[in-house]
């Protein structure tokens, strides 16, 4: 019986490890400012949510979109992110930054 429990425990630990490795390989962005996540990579698009300061969000990739007029610089890089409510949107690099690849089909 001891061997069976050990095998089950090792199997469960391997599953948890696989899940953690999969999650850590997904990209993230860290937001240093509060800001709107929009439906498309432009200030003129409707917001789908707000990012919070010092929070990380899953991000698949970034796109080059319309420049964001923040008053100091014009940022064209927009990250495609997933918000905690499951909605996807785009956040400008003025608010968040991360090491993710460029989106392929945009």
Image: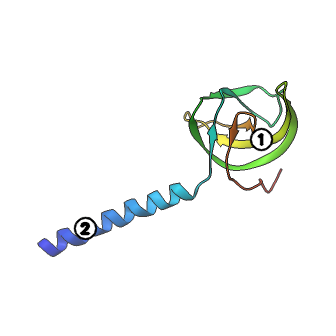
Q: Residue at x 73, y 43 (%)?
A: 79
Q: Residue at x 52, y 56 (%)?
A: 24
Asked which colour scheme the image uses, the reply is rainbow
Q: How many marks?
A: 2
Task: Please state, as top left, top right, bottom left or bottom right, where the N terminus lies in the image.
Answer: bottom left
Answer with left or right where residue 33 lies relative to residue 92: left
As helix, strand or loop, the secondary structure at mark 1 comes to: strand
Task: Residue 54: name its quadrant.
Answer: top right
Tag of residue 42: none
Image location of residue 84, percent across then percent down: 55, 35
Q: Residue at x 68, y 38 (%)?
A: 96
Image location of residue 5, percent across then percent down: 18, 68
Give the labeled residue for mark 2. Answer: 8
Residue at the left extreme of this rendering: 1
Answer with left or right where residue 68 lies relative to residue 2: right
Answer with left or right where residue 5 lies relative to residue 44: left
From what the image shows, is residue 64 above or below residue 6? above
Q: Residue at x 66, y 42 (%)?
A: 81
Q: Earlier in the sequence, mark 2 or mark 1?
A: 2
As helix, strand or loop, the secondary structure at mark 2 comes to: helix
Q: Nearer the viewer, mark 2 or mark 1?
A: 1
Task: Residue 53: name its quadrant.
Answer: top right
Give the labeled residue for mark 1. Answer: 78
Measured Cα–Cα span from mark 2 to mark 1: 45 Å
Callout 2: few (<14), some (14-19), or many (20+) C-alpha neighbours within 10 Å? Answer: few
């Amino acid at each position: 019986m001891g061997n069976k429990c050990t095998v089950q425990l090792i199997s469960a630990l391997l599953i948890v490890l696989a899940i953690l490795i999969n999650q850590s390989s997904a990209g993230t962005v860290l937001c240093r400012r509060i800001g709107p996540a929009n439906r498309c990579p432009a200030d003129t698009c409707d917001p789908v949510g707000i990012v919070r300061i010092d929070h990380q969000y899953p991000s698949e990739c970034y796109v080059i979109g319309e420049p964001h007029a923040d008053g100091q610089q014009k940022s064209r890089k927009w990250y495609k992110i997933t918000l905690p409510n499951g909605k996807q949107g785009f956040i400008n690099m003025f608010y968040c930054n991360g090491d993710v690849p460029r989106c392929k089909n945009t």
